[in-house]
Amino acid sequence: MAGRKSYNQNCPIARGVDVIGERWTLLVLRELIGGARRYSDLRAALPGIATNLLADRLRELEDAGLVDRTELPAPIARTVYTLSQTGWRKVPPVIQAVARFGLDLVVQDNSALTPLNGFLAGILLAFDPARADALDATYRVDIDGRRFEFAVKNGTLSAGTTEPAVTVTAAAADVITARIGSTAAQRKAALRRLRFVGDGDDVAAMRTAFHLAGDPQLAASG
């Protein structure tokens, strides 16, 4: 990209890092995987980022084809940023891999119990494409009041475009404990506190694709 440093190496790792390896870039993508966000939402979620740097990162991601900017009509009349179709295809596996790498480095205290961490640890990391190749459905996950919407189609994650087939309501503490609780009893108890609303077959299919049945220990999905 013009104006950015490059490793100038013709290999997939160097080329990929040229696009997503700048400071803050992966965290911007982390936020957008949770759904459409306004500029002000991103600023609030990324304390410490300078406003001009955030604008630069969003522009670079748009130029790379990973992020779309949409102007919503009146009376809303605001700009929102979302992952593009290419972004949904390329970004989730990267976020999954980095989050799985860093999961055991997270300090286990109340600061970790955020809705986004709950979504990442409790839902995204456990997505299993091999169990989802026949799915075509939108899902909604409400974690401590924050809503995440996404779809699964042909074994891949994508933006939610229809009414959700299943809605899950949970506390961040429960959805995180369901994955990384220290004992099977803790994980199962936390999983039982998650509330699923939807047709029985749809709920069962989602539970299967995201390892939300039985003992949902994250290691089981690796």
Image (cartoon, rainbow, N blue to C red):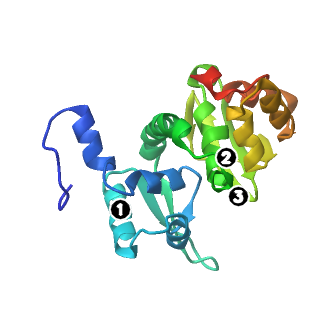
| Residue found 79% across the figure and 22% down from its top | 214
| Residue found 73% across the figure and 41% down from its top | 175
Of 86 and 102, which appears nearest the observer?
A: 102
**Is 100 placed left or right of 200 in the picture?**
left
Q: Is mark 3 on a helix, strand or loop?
A: strand
Marks 2/1: CA–CA distance: 25 Å
Q: Residue 212 carries which label?
A: none
Marks 3/1: CA–CA distance: 24 Å
Q: Please name the residue that numbered disc 3 is placed on.
A: 146
Of 41 and 78, which appears nearest the observer?
A: 41
Q: Please name the residue that numbered disc 2 is placed on.
A: 118
| Residue found 25% across the figure and 47% down from its top | 18
Marks 3/2: CA–CA distance: 10 Å
Position in image of residue 207 (x %, y %): 75, 29
Q: How crowded is mark 3: few (under 14 residues within 10 Å), some or many (20 or more)?
A: few
Instruction: Report the label total.
Output: 3
Tell me which amino acid carries mark 2. Answer: Gly
Q: Which of the marked residues, 2 or 1, is nearer the chain's N terminus? A: 1
Instruction: Check the picture and name the quadrant holding the N terminus.
Output: bottom left
**Is 56 placed left or right of 97 in the picture?**
left
